[in-house]
């Protein structure tokens, strides 16, 4: 969360416990038209695009994560990562959605 310009951002709390907090930040950025040049993507109009970032951790140290099992497990504490990986395999769950990630975090509580 220590990125430039973070002082006026809105974060949505998706999960909060004594061990972990999961935050979501949605930004909107302007992607400019790019249609000139030999290897351009041929984007003929400006477009606003959403960008979502997830943060996992404690208030003193958050990590930016992607909704992928490897990234989520590396952001967890070592003992919790083993429990989470085992629980994911046993329950055929995935952390590639917000609901799946919240389910894993609530299991660790």
Image (cartoon, rainbow, N blue to C red):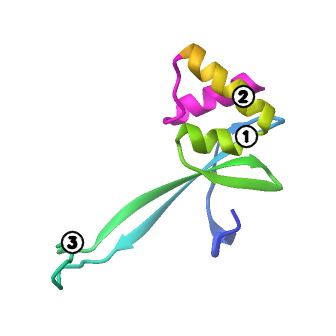
Question: Which quadrant of the figure contains the C terminus?
Answer: top right
Identify residue for label 3: 41
Q: Secondary structure at mark 2?
A: helix
Would you place residue 98 above or below residue 49 in this image? Answer: above
Which of the two marks, 3 or 2, is nearer to us in this view? 2
Would you place residue 54 above or below residue 41 in this image? Answer: above
* CA neighbours of label 3 inside 10 A, class few (<14), some (14 to 19), many (20+): few
Q: Residue at x 73, y 42 (%)?
A: 21
Out of 89 and 56, give the one closest to the viewer: 89
Of the image marks 1 and 2, the number of the one nearer the N terminus: 1
Out of 96 and 6, give the one closest to the viewer: 96
Q: Is residue 87 left or right of residue 38?
A: right
Q: Residue at x 52, y 18 (%)?
A: 92
Q: Are marks 1 and 3 in contact (CB under 8 Å)?
A: no
Question: Which quadrant of the figure contains the N terminus?
Answer: bottom right
Identify residue for label 2: 82
Magenta stretch: includes residue 56:
no
Residues at marks 1 and 2, CA–CA distance in whole angstroms: 9 Å
Q: Position of residue 2 (x, y in %)?
A: 71, 67
Query: Dividing the picture into quarters, in which one does residue 5 lie?
Result: bottom right
Out of 82 and 59, give the one closest to the viewer: 82
Residues at marks 3 and 2, CA–CA distance in whole angstroms: 43 Å
Residues at marks 1 and 3, CA–CA distance in whole angstroms: 38 Å
Q: Is residue 20 left or right of residue 100?
A: right
Identify residue for label 1: 76
Q: Are marks 1 and 2 in contact (CB under 8 Å)?
A: no
Which of the two marks, 1 or 2, is nearer to us in this view? 2
Of the image marks 3 and 2, the number of the one nearer the N terminus: 3
Out of 69 and 30, give the one closest to the viewer: 69
What residue range appears in magenta? Answer: 92-109
Q: Position of residue 77 (x, y in %)?
A: 78, 39
Of the image marks 1 and 3, the number of the one nearer the N terminus: 3
């Amino acid at each position: 969360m220590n990125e430039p310009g973070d002082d006026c951002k809105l974060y949505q709390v998706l999960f909060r416990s004594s061990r972990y907090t999961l935050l979501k930040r949605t930004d909107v950025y302007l992607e400019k038209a790019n249609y000139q040049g030999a290897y351009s993507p041929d984007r003929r109009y400006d477009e606003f695009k959403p960008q979502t970032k997830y943060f996992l951790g404690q208030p003193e140290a958050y990590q930016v994560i992607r909704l992928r099992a490897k990234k989520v497990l590396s952001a967890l504490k070592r003992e919790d990562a083993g429990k989470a990986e085992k629980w994911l395999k046993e329950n055929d769950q995935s952390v590639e959605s917000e609901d799946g990630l919240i389910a894993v975090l609530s299991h660790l509580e």
